[in-house]
Amino acid sequence: MKKLNIFVFAAALLFGLNASVEAQITEKPEFGKFAITGATIHTVTNGTIEGGVILIDGQKIVQVGQNVKITNDYTQIDASGKHVYPGFIDGWSSLGLVEVSAVAVTVDNRELGQFNPHMYAFTAFNPHSAAVPVTRVSGVTTVFTHPSSGSIAGKGAVMDLWGYSPDSMAVKKSGALILELPSSQGGGWWDNRSEEEIKKEYEQDIKEINDFIAKAKFYDEMTAAYNANPSGKTKPDFDPRMDAMREVLSGDVPVVIPVSREQEILDAIEWTKSHEGMNFVFAGVEEGWRVADEIAEAGIPVLTTTLYTPSRDYDNYQRPYQNPGLMAQAGVKVAIVSDDTENSRNAPFEAGYAAAYGLGTEEAIKALTINPAEIFGVDDVLGSLEAGKQANLFISNGDPLEPMTDIEHVFIKGYKIPMTSRHTQLYDEFLDRDAVNK
C-alpha cells in the first residue's frame, strides 16, 4: 500500500510538473524596439496625452509624448482609438506561492515557528504557475506576493509576471516584512475565553513581539558599532533572524500589518507609535472607514479590497465598496489589491467598484499603479509611464476597470507578451467540442 501511495504521488508530481512547465510559457514574446502610436496615454503622474506616442527600447520606456520622431528600426503598433496605461500592480497576493489552495503540496507560503524574518517568499516563487499568464493578460503585470504564518511570517517580494526564474522576475526581493499583531478582541461566539484571559494573552503576545524587536535593535546597534570601528571589539555572532531585521528597523523595508476591525486598527496605530524609524503599511483594513482620520494622521498607507462581507451585520452593504474612497478622502494613501491568488487578475475590477462608490476613476487607477509602487519603494521603476522607467504597460480598447474592456497588448520589462493563458487555451479547446466528429 505504501509503495502504491508513493507511485501515485510520484505520478501526480510528474504530471503536475509537466503541466506546470507548460503553464506560463505559452508562446515566445517579442522583444526589441516598439513605437505605440495614436493612443490616449494615461501617464498617471503627468496627465493624459491624446494621440500620443510611446517608444520602447529593450526593457525601458525611452520617450512619451506627442510629435515624437520614430526611426525605421521601431516596430510600430497603431493604437488609434485605444488607451495605454502603466501595468497594474496587485499589492497583496499569494501568486506564485499557492497554486491550488486545497492541494497541500502546491501551497508554499508558510513556515514553522513564530518569528521568521529571514524567510523570503522570493525563494519559493514558482515562475511557471498557471495563474501567472492568466493574471498578466488582464493588465496586472506585477504583484506583491507574501508569506502568511506566525507572528513574523517573513518577507514578501515584488515580482513581475514574465520570466523563466524568480531572479529574472524579481523587482524587489525584499519587498516588505509581514507582521501579524494579536487581537485584543474576542474571537466571536465560539471563543469561550473570559475578558481577563483575552487581555492576558494579548499582552503576552505583544510582549513577545516587542522583546523580539528589542533584541533585533540591540543586534543592529552592536553590528553597526563593530562595522564602524572593529578595533578592540568582538565581532557579534551572525544571527540570520536578527540580521534580516536590520533593513526593517532602518525603515528601508516596510512592515505590513494585516488588520480588519476598528479596534484592531486603533491598537495597531498605537503600537506603531512605540517603534519610530520603522515604516508601516496596513493590509485588509475592512473597517478603515470608521477610523480613516486616525489612519491618515498616523501617515500609514493601506492595501485594501472591496469584495468582502461587512463584519457587522448592521453595516450597509455598500461599505466595502465605499471603504477605499472614504479613506482616500480622509488623506490615506490607498492601494487596491486582490488578497487572493487565482483572482489576482480581478484586482482591476475591485478597483472599479471603489471608483464607482466614491474613489473616482483617476484615484482608482493610481490605487493600482503609482500608489502601490510608492508603498513598496519601486516607484523609480514602476507605476507610471515616464521615460526611463521599466516598460510595463498595456493597451486596452476602453476603461480597464470595466469587465467588458479588452486588454489587447501587454508589455512586461519591454517584452510584448503573448495574450494566451490556460483560460484562452481551454476556451479554444471547448469552443467547438463536436468539431472532431464532423
Image (cartoon, rainbow, N blue to C red):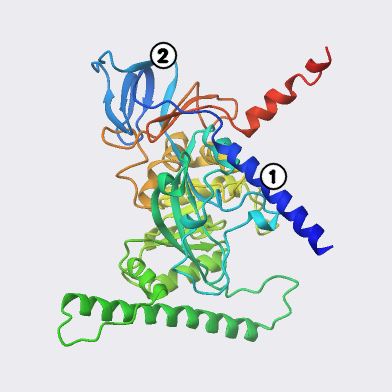
How many other residues sit within 10 Å of disc 1, few (<14), some (14-19) or many (≥20)? Answer: few
In this view, the residue in front, 100 or 402, is 100
Frontmost residue, 132 versus 264: 132
Question: The C terminus lies in which quarter of the figure?
Answer: top right
Which element carries disc 2, helix, strand or loop? loop
Which residue does the numbered mark 2 point to in the structure image?
A: 80
Alpha-carbon distance for marks 2 and 1? 44 Å
Q: Amino acid at mark 1?
A: Phe
- Residue 326 lies, in percent from the top left, at 49, 49
The residue under label 1 is: 15
Residue nearest the viewer, comparing 194 with 69: 69
Residue at x 67%, y 59% (from the top left corner): 312
Q: Quadrant of the N terminus?
A: bottom right
Tell me residue 76's x, y (percent): 36, 15
Above or below for 355 versus 238: above
Q: Residue at x 69, y 29 (%)?
A: 426
Image quarter for residue 395?
Answer: top left
The residue drawn where x is 30% and y is 31% is 61
Instruction: Determine whether 26 is above or below 145 in the image.
Output: above
